[in-house]
Image (cartoon, coloured by chain):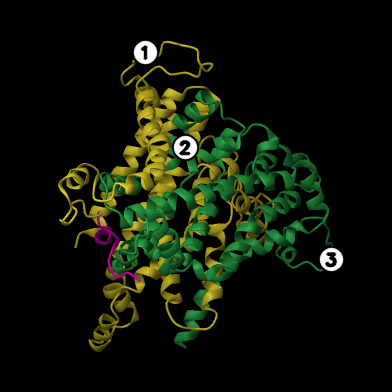
Amino acid sequence: MKRFGRVTVLSLGALLFLFPFYYMIITSFQAKPNTSLAGAFPFGGWTLQNYREINARVDLLGSLANSGIFTGGVILATLVFGVLAGYALARLHFRGQGTLFSLMLLVQLVPFQLLIIPLYVMIVRSYGLADSYLGMILPFAINSTAVFVFRQFFLQLPEDLFAAARIDGAGELRVLWSIALPLVRPAMVTAVLLTFIGPWNEFLWPFLVTKNANMQPLAVSLANYLSNIAGRAANPYGATLAGAVVLAAPAVALFVAFQRHFTSSDLGSGVKG
Amino acid sequence: MTTTSPSTAIQTPASTPTASPTPQKRGRVASILGRQPLGIAFAAPYAVFLAVVFAYPLGLAVWISFHDYFFAAPGASVARPFVGFANYATALSDPAVRRSFLNVAIFLVINVPITVALALLLANALNAAMRGRTFFRVAYYVPYVSAGVAVVSVWLFLFSKNGMVNQVLGSLAPDPSWLVNSTLAMPLIAVFVAWKQLGFFILLYLAALQNVPKELYESAQMDGANKWQQLRNVTIPGVRPATVLVVILATITGANLFSEPYLLTNGGGPNGASASPVLVMYQKGIEQGNPDVASAIGVILVIAVLLVSLLNRRLLERD
């Protein structure tokens, strides 16, 4: 009986979370939207027309490539510079360490959105980086949460390991590359997953930076379609939802495939310290 | 992995290096740059990054908010006189700005209790060894990892005038419909955001639940406490640090609200009833070309977020 109650609560929750996704996929393959409850369980009327329609209005492949370059650039910079910073914060003693650590925590408290005006003035107006990948990537380049995750994991390694390597004459880069990194590989996956969803799903910043449709990531071009063009399409919701499926699929697939790297204990160490 | 609360677990790194038998000269370098000066080189790119995209813009936002600032061609030298609090006065006397702050308050009043209650309920149910645990855990964070723009389109469809929700409600459907109803638009956004973020908060609570000692439940049972009393007297106090974090993060999310009102209610409609401060900042600063007033709104919002976070911490952490 007790177990039954638990499973009921969990199943209701799962229904609440998954139904919109189920409905999104079903509707994206339907020729005519049927908004009655029965419309969620159709028997016929399957079509790929919605995907053709959205692809005609929004260059799906090009937008996906833009999203990929934007996200890839952020992940690359976070892995290279974030690991170095996390290692220094956890394992090296240097002047300014405490200040940098406090700053890293503070960054996570001040909402990014509030910096959009000065960042827009700097990046778009002063540096002329509108409609460029660099302009998109710059404000996100090193994910502070990932730096924090790296620091926490490097901190958990035993000090003897480092002392031994240094006595054997290994330089710090060598210690980091050959000793520390192989031991924190699971943390790398968690950090990459956390970093991935930021730029992949980001809307406001690329929306401000890219006005040229050829440079827009999928989230931006889909939103533009939604607010400008959708009204004129034959099956506006079908086409929009087809685009939504294309946008959501990579992130969902990645998180399902690597779900064991995104558990409460990974996050617990990342978010709580 | 960790058994401490967020407030106590974050230790600052040791600043005083332990004494080691090194020559005089190295000792002097160490006293200026630290024991391992290489750390400065390792951390430098990140430090520069924080300075360029965080510290400097923060300062620039404050500077712009006190000056008569407008967009000019790059390189052109234009006078941008100091105007004191004029931009703040303009912002605060604007009904659209005031409405957007009221909207965040409505958002928080609805979003935070739903988030805390449901996240705790589902994390509690999930906190047991059983079949299908992984499935539920993954199912719950699917909305969290999906792009806002993608899930907004489904909600737009579900809650449109002739959408499924109204079809199911039949004659009970609100008129005007959800997204064009000035009383219901903002609450619906609050529910949407709660739904989208819940998976992340469930994981946070799940981590916190691991830290509640099992013995407390055993002794509560021994004293004859029922499930509800155990929840009230053991679980809720046990996860209080996580609750503080959840409330602060929800406040930050509320302050950051942009794509939901922009897309779900077509630019904060009806009549600004669901406009968020960031949306108003965008409209004033970039669409209408008044970055000075927009920066003032931003500064007010940062101060408000910090105050609300501090207040939450005070209220929730007192015993």
Disc 3/disc 1 C-alpha distance (Å) = 67 Å
Q: Name the residue under label 1.
A: B81
Q: Mark 3 points at which residue?
A: A44
Residue B267 at least partly seen: no
Q: Which chain letter goes with mark 3?
A: A
Q: What residue type is labelled 3?
A: Gly
Examine the rendered structure and indicate whether residue B127 appears above or below residue B84.
below
Q: Measuring from the top left, give residue B232's x and y in whole percent.
A: 30, 73
Q: Residue at point 62% right, 60% down?
A: B169
Q: Chain B is drawn in which colour?
A: yellow
What is the display colour for chain A? green
Question: Which residue is nearer to you in this view: A188 or A114?
Answer: A188
Q: Residue at x 54, y 16 (%)?
A: B73
**In the drawing, what numbered circle is on residue B278?**
2
The verdict on a common chain for dots 3 and 1 is no
Magenta region, residue range: B1-12
Type of amino acid at the residue the image marks with label 2: Val
Residue B252 badge: none
Q: Earlier in the sequence, mark 1 or mark 2?
A: 1
Magenta: main secondary structure: loop
For residue A210, say whether it is visible.
yes
